[in-house]
Image (cartoon, grey):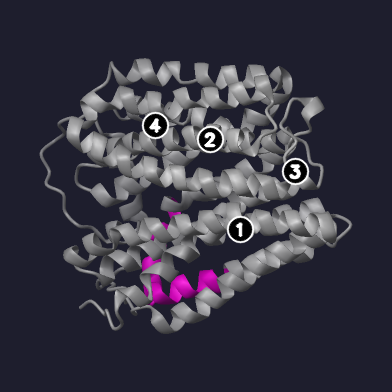
Amino acid sequence: MKATIRNPKLWVPTLYLAQGLPFFAVAIVANQMLKSMGVPNDELNHWTALIGFAWVFKPLWSPFLELAPSKKLVVTFFQVFGGLCLGGVALALQAPFWFAASMAMLALVGISAATHDIACDGLYITSLDEKGQAQYAGWTGTFFNAAKFFTTGALLLLAGHFEKTLGVVPAWTICFCILGAMMIALGLYNGWALPLAKNEIAAGTNAASIARTLREVIVEFFKKPGIWVSIVFIILFRAGEAQVQSIGPLFLREARHLGGLGLSTAEVGAVYGTVGTVAFLVGSIAGGYFTSWLSLKRAILWLILAVNLPNIAFYLLSYFQPTDLSIIGAALSVEMFGYGFGFVGLILYMMQVVAPGKYQTAHYAFATGIMQLGFVLFKLFSGDIQIALGYQHFFIWVMLSAIPVAVLSQLIPMTARPQQKEEAQPAPLEQAV
């Protein structure tokens, strides 16, 4: 029985705001903080990429969350715990060994956020019927991206202000305290607002039986026809995008004599976190309509080009090094619009080509883990490549990185390949991932 006690308008926004805040804190805010602290591009991307592996491997422990009494308990615990860890980053900045301490705390934030994601989506699915899920689907994306708007826009503007008035360490201490306090407040509020979403454990279900089911799901995933080609496609899809998303914001901050644009933290927040985020959202909506009109098979090449061709904006910025914020903002808007427009292609490929089968929900979760793996792998080495090539040649390399996936998209099927005829049956694992 579904326990939807309160109106979803009271908890869907706060649930997905809490999903987004720690994700963007690790993915973007941490990079900006480390850049302000003088950490080189290669080193900071190495560490934040490694933290990103939490989202890669989360499907492996997601089934075991079904052993908790309810999804609400898991969600609220990890919101509060994540908030404490974000506050721990602020505390770590005060230590002589601040870098190691802050990376340790950010790693805990990543693990906590990745685990929260599992229970968050599970609670949404089990607490709403199909009509409700469709009705509030737009809300989930809106408030997840509201977290991006806040962290990469308002928070960076605030950090930039405090960097000038108080200094770098106090500025980022305040910012991570704000993030931590927001997460704790959301956890406490959601403890009241969220439906219970009890986990219905079948008789005889325990950690050992879940581990056996997990093994079967993994085996079935890798038995899918053409799965290795699909894995290569998913990873290569993010080759250019992952590198430009990792280095682009750092390029904006880099000193002009080193090839960057020399923007302040606040200016990056203004052009990248606000205007850029709005362009991304508009692009995502437009990409969805475009693909539904044309079909994935006919649209996929255009979607790949949409993600990658606008990266020429970064090359032009590195070549001309403009100082006018309106020009910089316009260039970034084009790039972010294309990113949002084309990224739809990867999501639909995973849903329509990779996921179908007996364990559809679980296999989609595995595909999203592979998607994150693609981002992490290219982010991991993006700093090394940028330092070796310089910014201008790096952005040329980024555009060339799109060629393999563009070619592959024309050689592989864009529909699910036939398998042994087994109708999709719900399994305990599918409720967990």
Residue 91 percent across, percent down from the top left: 77, 66
Q: Name the secondary structure under disc 2.
A: helix
Circle 2 is placed at which residue position?
A: 330
* Mark 2 or 3, closer to the camera: 2
Q: Name the residue type under label 4.
A: Ile
Give the mark nearest the N terminus, 2 or 3: 3
Residues marked 2 and 3 touching at CB (< 8 Å): no
* Mark 1 or 4, closer to the camera: 1
Circle 3 is placed at which residue position?
A: 35
Rounded to the nearest angstrom, the CA distance separating label 2 from label 1 is: 19 Å
* Mark 4 or 2, closer to the camera: 2
* Mark 2 or 1, closer to the camera: 2
Residues marked 3 and 1 touching at CB (< 8 Å): no
Q: Residue at x 42, y 33 (%)?
A: 338
Magenta stretch: give its range. 60-81
Residue 85 visible: no
